[in-house]
Image (tube, rainbow, N blue to C red):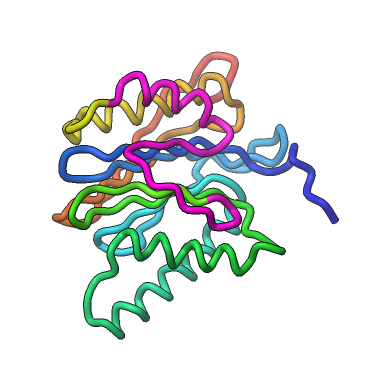
Amino acid sequence: MAFNEAFIPGATVVGIAYDGGVLLGAERRVTLGGFVISSTGKKTFKVTDRVGAACAGMIADMQILMKELQSYVKIRELETRKQMAPNSVAKLLSVIMFERRYFPFITQVMLGGVDTKPSIYVLDPLGSVIPDDYAAVGSGAEIAIGVVENGYTDGMTEQQAKELGVKAIKAAIKRDVSSGDGVDLVYVTKDGFREESLPLAPQAGRGA
């Protein structure tokens, strides 16, 4: 049975590397076609104290994929007795997703972490890995990436990255009916992992 693209959930996920850390952000709306299933869907995840993730796609697929990744990372860290670097986590996730290429997880994943420098990695459902300083995925990505590209500069502060990321997600929400209902943010720095949630004021006629 083939998937009908109209019923694959949309989303907007943004990632920005800044001076000393990485910001990952995702909105909360969960849809099935034109029907809003939930306004509290969480699409951001903690992988380790130095690596976070944000996903767009099927909620069940991203939840199971992240649990599997967390388990493999924990096992590897117990074996080596040291934390996995963000690029190693990205390579591991790539292998997990590629092994399922004939029955792929219906999700795009953005990993962000800090090792010698802040890094962002984007993975498609087949496990391709693309490193970048900033990125956007999901149904609202085309709108969000334009905002990020226009405002991004090297050496941004955490506050500047937050303002730009939220601005990009809000811009996507205005045009993408599959995105909305608030923003979840993840910050990853050498000091660790932390999260923040921001409500959004409803927009007239959109319910977002």
Q: Is residue 25 magenta?
A: no
- Number of marks present in the image shown: 0
Judge left or right: residue 6 versus residue 44.
right
User: Camera-side residue: 96 or 203?
Assistant: 96
Relative image position of residue 119 (x, y in whole percent): 29, 48
State which quadrant residue 156 falls in. top left
Which range of residues does the magenta coloring cover?
124-152
Q: Is residue 139 magenta?
A: yes
Judge left or right: residue 61 versus residue 93.
right
Say above or below: 64 vs 36: below
Judge left or right: residue 32 versus residue 19.
right
User: Camera-side residue: 59 or 87?
Assistant: 87
Residue at coordinates 49% horizontally, 32% vertically from top-left?
A: 181
Say above or below: 155 vs 97: above
Relative image position of residue 103 (x, y in whole percent): 70, 63
Q: Farthest residue in the bottom direction?
A: 79
Relative image position of residue 123 (x, y in whole percent): 50, 51
Residue at coordinates 56% horizontally, 63% vertically from top-left?
A: 97
Quarter occupied by the N terminus: bottom right
Relative image position of residue 55 (x, y in whole percent): 49, 48
Residue at coordinates 43% horizontally, 34% vertically from top-left?
A: 182
Residue at coordinates 63% horizontally, 66% vertically from top-left?
A: 100
